[in-house]
Every structure is written in structure tokens, then in C-alpha cells.
Amino acid sequence: MSKTYAIAAAVAVILVVAGFAVVRSFAADNAPMPQEGQAAPTFTLPNQEGTPVDFGSYRGKWVVLYFYPKDMTTGCTIEAHNFQRDLDKYKALNAVILGVSVDTVDSHKQFCTKDSLTFTLLADPDKKVVEQYGSLGNFGPMVIAKRNTFLIDPQGKIVKVWTSVNPNTHSDDVLAALGQLQKAG
């Protein structure tokens, strides 16, 4: 009888944990995402040095606001390296790169040091900005940022949104869109 009880208890615990994960996933995956044409939500987050960065201070510049899952993981490192590789091209187009994940300031600092990243990474361990941009998701038991990017014009309006991006080609895709938008505007 005790074996049966132990198995039943284990199954109950598994069902409760699975149910909690589904509820968390449902809640995280259903936050509204700002759309093209809308004003970009403003925020202040610390960068990799711990210095608060006010998003509003970038008015007058194009902003590539990209959300990524985790520092020092394969896809995130590829994506960051490609943005770093193209940083001079972005600067020539009056654009800045801002990367956001739910990692800590210390994690960002290590990532920047290890991978020679010189653009700004913003720490959102409280997940407020990630959620504000509809980019909160789950990877197993971890709550992470989804790989989404928002291109924001110098007036603070979202002009392009990419979801579930390919880290291998994403910087090229953003540069192409930025060039087209600047020619059209």
C-alpha cells in the first residue's frame, strides 16, 4: 500500500508542477506586444556597468532594441557578435544597438568582457521591460526573453518588429530594413 501511495503522491506533484509551468507559460506568452506604428514604451534599466540608461535619451537616433534569451549561450553569442561586427555600419546610419535580457548586470559585464562587446546590454532581471515589450517566454523551467527585435525611429515610434529571429542573419536583416526605411523617409 505504501508503494502505491508514494507513486500516487509523485504523480500528483508532477501534475501540480506541470500545471504551474503551463500557467506560467500561458501568462508569459500572452503579454501584448507593441506593434509597428505605436510609440515605443519607455523605460530605464541598468547597463553592463550598472549605470541606469534612460530609453528616452536616444531620441534623435534610430534604436535597434533586441531581446535575447541568455548571456553566453550559442545563439545569443552569435547574434551579439554579428551586431558587434556591424556596429560601424549602424553608427553610420545614426543607429544604436540595445540588447536586453533577464540576466543580471554582472552577467552582462562578463558577457561583454568575454566576447569583446562594446554596445549596450541592459539588465532586466525583474522582467518588467521584457514583459512590457511582449517578449517574455519560457524555456523549460526558466523564464527568459524571447528573441524579438524592435526598430524604433528617431521620434520614438516602432517602425519594424521581428519575432523569433535567426541569430545568424539578424543583423543583416536589420541593416537592410534600416537602410530601406532611411531611403524611403
Image (spheres, grey):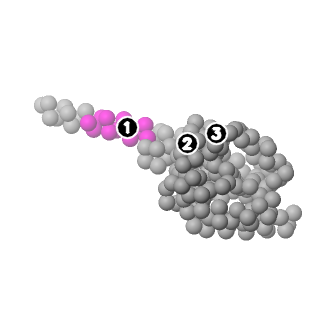
Question: Which of labels 2 and 1 is toward the front?
Answer: 2
Q: On screen, 15 above or below 59?
A: above
Q: Mark 3 touching mark 1, by CB under 8 A?
A: no
Q: Secondary structure at mark 2?
A: helix
Q: Quadrant of residue 18?
A: top left
The residue at the far left in this view is: 1
Q: Is residue 184 left or right of residue 151?
A: right
Residue 34: x %, y % from top left:
70, 47
Q: Is residue 141 left or right of residue 36?
A: left
Q: Residue at point 54% right, 45% down?
A: 107
Q: Which residue is mark 3?
A: 50
Mark pair 2, 3: CA separation: 8 Å
Per the image, is 77 magenta?
Answer: no
Tell me where the magenta segment starts and ends, as one range: 10-21
Determine if residue 42 is in view. Answer: no
Q: Which residue is mark 1?
A: 17
Q: Which residue is mark 2?
A: 106
Q: Quadrant of residue 6?
A: top left
Q: Nearer the viewer, residue 1 or 69?
A: 69
